[in-house]
Image (cartoon, grey):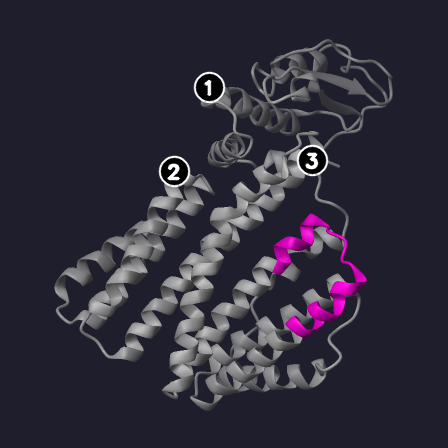
Amino acid sequence: MGLSTIEDLSENLAKLSCRLTDDQNTSMIESQLLHIKLLTAIKKYGCVKAYIYPIVEEIKKYICSIDDKKMIQEAKYLLKLDCAYYLGEVANFQYSHDVVLLRMKETLNITSSFQERIEKVQYTVELFQQSYEISNEILKEADKNKLETTKAHALYIMCHNFFQFEFSSLFLKVEVDESQKEAARLLYVNKMDDIIHAAYLFQKNNLLEDAHNMLCLGSDINRLYKSIYGSYLSNYDESKYFKIVAEIEKATGLTRKKSLFDVVAPFRDSKPISNEDVYSDMTDADIDKFSLNMIETMNLPIDRLINLKKDLTELRQFHRKRHCRNLILLQNLTHTASQETLYRNAPLFLFDCLKKKWRTGETTDTSVLLDKMVNGVCKDCSEKVPTNV
């Protein structure tokens, strides 16, 4: 029987958990339920603290309970590593979200003090640190007790968090000082050594899918290094590396998952995605989630949420109904002058025609104005450029 939603899966796992009696299987399902709960909240609410952080606290509390469970030590280690991965996921998601909104605030000329920025990322840094400390502690124990696959899993989480953090930092466009490059190179070399060692341990223990994932992560880290510093790591033979990946894929039928580099390739290598596509495709849920995140990030009163939603709704409406590419939407941005005025009132819009060189008056309802124009001044225009071509 197929499961149509995360909620269905969660409900079935909860029922199964009630029927199990041994700690190990019950604990594994409890861990998965926490993960599902976290992913569902992130999907629905984005990074709104009121919804995400209580689940994070549940995960932390769960980690503290693991040592009291009746199961073998290695199973406890793996359970803790799962939770460390969940914490890393939240930290990575929150950090990438913070980076995007920081860039957005810069475009609105909204400045933040150094102290404000530190406070903003403090919780994210703490989550990264907790994920690292759990993984590193288990790495040492696994190394001491010769638990090879546990050691490899710990290395994967640490390298994965490293890659996600560094990748998100790319979008801050921070200039790298020459004096920092050698230290950064050594850090990347150490991560590549960890990846190659972990992949070897996975392969040795016949965990070929894990070995494959590890090697693909290594490729991403090398590509990341090239994006920042202009060249691949000198001690890394990419052709030899991918020969091993290809051998695993041939033996198992595995295929490489799309990496973050492939996901952002359209933004980096191709023509930019148009506002037409971005805003037209926004759902009501997208608008709700983005508006809540903006309210929290900008530290705005909750009563301004309606005006922020209005902004996004009007943008979507304009790009869905616009009848000519010569027509562009402008917003009166005087409200962005300060925190006190930002979205205090409903945003005002107006239209410009690039061909006729005229401009409309301001309105809070783009739909009404568009309807008047398509049946009025634009009706017999010979220079109309339809938006569907």
Q: Is residue 15 left or right of residue 194?
A: left
Q: Which is nearer the N-term, disc 3 or disc 2?
A: 2
Q: Relative to 372, is 223 above or below?
A: below
Please tell me whether mark 3 sits on a helix, a strand or a loop. helix
Q: Which is nearer the N-term, disc 1 or disc 2?
A: 2
Kindly identify the amino acid type of the residue bearing the numbered disc 2: Ala
Kindly identify the amino acid type of the residue bearing the numbered disc 1: Asp
Which segment is the magenta one? 166-187
Please tell me whether mark 2 sits on a helix, a strand or a loop. helix
| Quadrant of res 146 | bottom left
Mark 2 — residue? Answer: 50
Check the picture and name the quadrant holding the C terminus. top right
Q: CA distance from mark 1 to mark 2?
A: 17 Å
Kindly identify the amino acid type of the residue bearing the numbered disc 3: Glu
Pick the residue in front: 118 or 262.
Answer: 118
Mark 1 — residue? Answer: 303
Q: Which mark is residue 164?
A: none
Question: Which dot, 3 or 1, sits closer to the camera?
Answer: 3
Q: Which mark is residue 106?
A: 3
Q: Is residue 8 left or right of residue 210?
A: left
What residue is shown at x 77% (from left), y 48% (from top)? 271
Q: CA distance from mark 3 to mark 1?
A: 23 Å
Q: Relative to 350, is 283 above or below?
A: below
Where's residue 96, x and y in %?
Answer: 57, 49
| Quadrant of res 181 | bottom right
What residue is shown at x 73% (from left), y 50% (from top)? 173
* Other residues around mark 3 within 10 Å, as few (<14) / some (14–19) / many (≥20): few
